[in-house]
């Protein structure tokens, strides 16, 4: 059986205010910890493996001012099962350190690209 090869191929953060963000939102433990979280919690759906479906799912979400995640949505999907798996792994993330603007926490929008690859 082929195994899942996961890769975080792209991570983008956008400001949601008119002023530039002075400090971006940070996942607890940084990017390495974020990758470990996704690798440990993402499940490659059986139906997608059986059909040899591979590709990238882009998940957009908001980091709120208290660090919680909200407004999780798929902006570029692969199939229903992979989209649901990618969305679930984002929704399972712990609180982030929020973005700051002039020492005030602000909401920020992030896009996480998750690659499903059977290797």
Image (cartoon, rainbow, N blue to C red):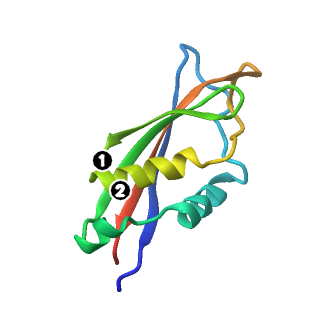
The reply to whether residue 113 is visible in this rendering is: no
Q: Residue furthest bottom?
A: 1
Q: Residue at x 45, y 64 (%)?
A: 7
Q: Quadrant of residue 51?
A: bottom left
Query: In this orientation, which residue lies closer to the viewer: 23 or 25?
Result: 25
Residue 102, relative to residue 38: is it above or below? Answer: above
Residue hosting label 1: 77
Residue 48 at x, y percent in the picture: 29, 66
Residue hosting label 2: 82
Q: Residue at x 54, y 65 (%)?
A: 39
Residue 6 at x, y percent in the picture: 45, 67
Residue 92, relative to residue 116: is it above or below? Answer: above
Distance between the alpha carbons at the discs numbered 2 and 1: 8 Å
Q: Residue furthest right?
A: 103
Q: Residues within 10 Å of mark 1 (few under 14, many from 20)?
A: some
Residue 110 at x, y percent in the picture: 51, 37
Q: Secondary structure at mark 1?
A: loop
């Amino acid at each position: 059986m082929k195994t899942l090869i996961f890769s975080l191929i792209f991570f983008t953060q956008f400001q949601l205010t008119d002023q530039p963000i002075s400090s971006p939102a940070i996942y607890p433990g940084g990017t390495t910890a974020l990758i470990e979280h996704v690798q440990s919690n993402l499940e490659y759906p059986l139906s997608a493996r059986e059909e040899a479906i591979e590709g990238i799912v882009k998940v957009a979400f908001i980091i709120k001012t208290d660090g919680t995640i909200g407004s999780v949505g798929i902006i570029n999907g692969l199939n229903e099962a992979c989209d649901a798996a990618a969305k679930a792994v984002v929704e399972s993330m712990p609180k982030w350190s929020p973005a700051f603007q002039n020492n005030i926490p602000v909401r920020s929008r992030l896009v996480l690209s998750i690659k499903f690859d059977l290797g």
